[in-house]
Image (tube, coloured by chain):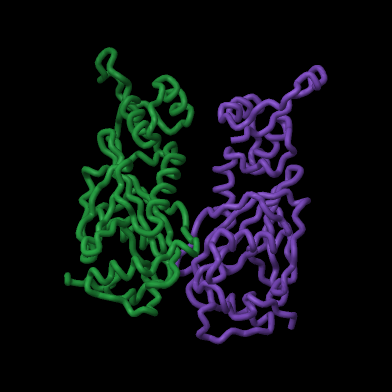
Chain colours: A green, B purple
Amino acid sequence: MRQTVPGEISKYGEGFVKGLAIDAVIFGFHNNQLKILIIEHGDANLFALPGGYIYEKEDLNDAAKRILASKTGLDGIFLDQFHIFGNYDRNNPETIKVIMQGQGIPPDPDHWILGRFFSVGFYALVDFTKAIPRTDALSDSCTWYDINDLPPLILDHKQIADKALEVLRENLDKKIGFNLLPETFTMATLKNLYETILGVPLLRSNFQRKILSLDILERAEDPVKYAHKAPFLYKFRRT
Amino acid sequence: MRQTVPGEISKYGEGFVKGLAIDAVIFGFHNNQLKILIIEHGDANLFALPGGYIYEKEDLNDAAKRILASKTGLDGIFLDQFHIFGNYDRNNPETIKVIMQGQGIPPDPDHWILGRFFSVGFYALVDFTKAIPRTDALSDSCTWYDINDLPPLILDHKQIADKALEVLRENLDKKIGFNLLPETFTMATLKNLYETILGVPLLRSNFQRKILSLDILERAEDPVKYAHKAPFLYKFRRT
């Protein structure tokens, strides 16, 4: 039985808001690859999205930042809630029991941790070469998985991940990728980011016309530095 | 003291999920006017967004539909969650006490209904000439207010309404207005809807170019019916 951490699930949820959890879909992008951070409860051989609970006096969004930082070592990155999952049948106390038993901390059968849970989905987009996934006391691994090759996930976590991807794609135009690119980048680099996240090839001329019409980019300064025929460099407009 | 209704707040929240509520921002549009449905707790002279609780075995989205139907008499209209409000300091037990005392049902001081609450914001957009606001057992009035002339609202309800308006504006292009317009409509009618919801005048040629590029409209059939120089009629594309 591994060491427990104060305030984690191993403490039977003491000090936390009951019945409401956070599940985080942390997308990692690098070199044409889009991945999701998945934790494994090794003792139970179960895969899940990283998540956690909210302290009784903690703001919801602060809890999400804390959980993200604890899993990735990253602070101050884009993070937003995208949906609350609240179907009654999304709960499965047997799965939670198996996870907790695997950790040597079987819960009381009538503990609220086995009852109905709502989950607030948060998503983030990071450069996975900069995020160092951390294994906590309750999971054996915390690993990047390609979005097209996810292991089976517990509960409705696959549905949560799918919804996050849908929202990520819808919101790509809102500078959501700004922390993935260097300060200045070419149109080809940006198109590459879009193609990987959208999962489809894009036509160069259409892409450039559309992205420029959004008014989120500006040309990088000091164009005299550029060699003849070198591609223009762009950066996100500060607003 | 007015009659209580089984399952309402007057029953001290029995049978409901604890600590989680729904607040609904129901936008009403008609003839260049954009309004929000507001209830008044007359005994306490407090104004609030309509809302309610989730039954213990009820899906979250079903609860929202039920609450919307109970306040407006409308079924099957567009309704979506847009944000969960979870700051610790959003709660104010004194306000809840005043409302309940006004109804002659003062709560026990340690009842969970006075504790921390998260609220899931849902929004809808309806034709306010078709929605018949209903007063329930716990409020004296349920009335349309112009978005620019709202009464002071309890708790963080103004912030919830503001966030809903922001999301409504961001999502206008997703056919969100389809249940507000007749099956076919002119570009001028659609532009008018946009202008009212966005709160700004739009240039006709820019608007037409942008809206057509979204690929959500198609020309209504049978153009030979149109008189010479009559404006084209459009309808939303079925997808």
Q: Please identify the quarter of the rendering in which residue B229 is found.
A: top right
- State which quarter of the image contains the C terminus of chain B: top right
Counting the numbered discs, the total is 0
> What residue do we see at 73% from left, 33% from top?
B184
> What residue do we see at 30% from left, 31% from top?
A184
Task: Name the spot of residue A222 as percent of width and height, x first.
Answer: 30, 23
- State which quarter of the image contains the N terminus of chain B: bottom right
User: Taking A173 as reference, is B39 left or right?
Assistant: right
Position of A196 relative to B151 (above/below) = above
Give the farthest residue toward the top: A228
Position of A234 relative to B197 (above/below) = above
> What residue do we see at 57% from left, 64% from top?
B22
Task: Name the spot of residue A146 as percent of width and height, x first.
Answer: 28, 42
Q: Please identify the quarter of the rendering in which residue B12 is found.
A: bottom right
Q: Which of A84 and B100 is in front in this view?
A: A84
Task: Name the spot of residue A26 as percent of width and height, x first.
Answer: 32, 50
Residue A13 seen in the current view: yes
Q: Please identify the quarter of the rendering in which residue B39 is found.
A: bottom right
Give the farthest residue toward the left: A2
Residue B148 seen in the current view: no
Task: Name the spot of residue A59 as percent of width and height, x first.
Answer: 41, 65
Position of A43 relative to B149 (above/below) = below
Position of A84 relative to A9 (above/below) = above
Give the farthest residue toward the bottom: B108
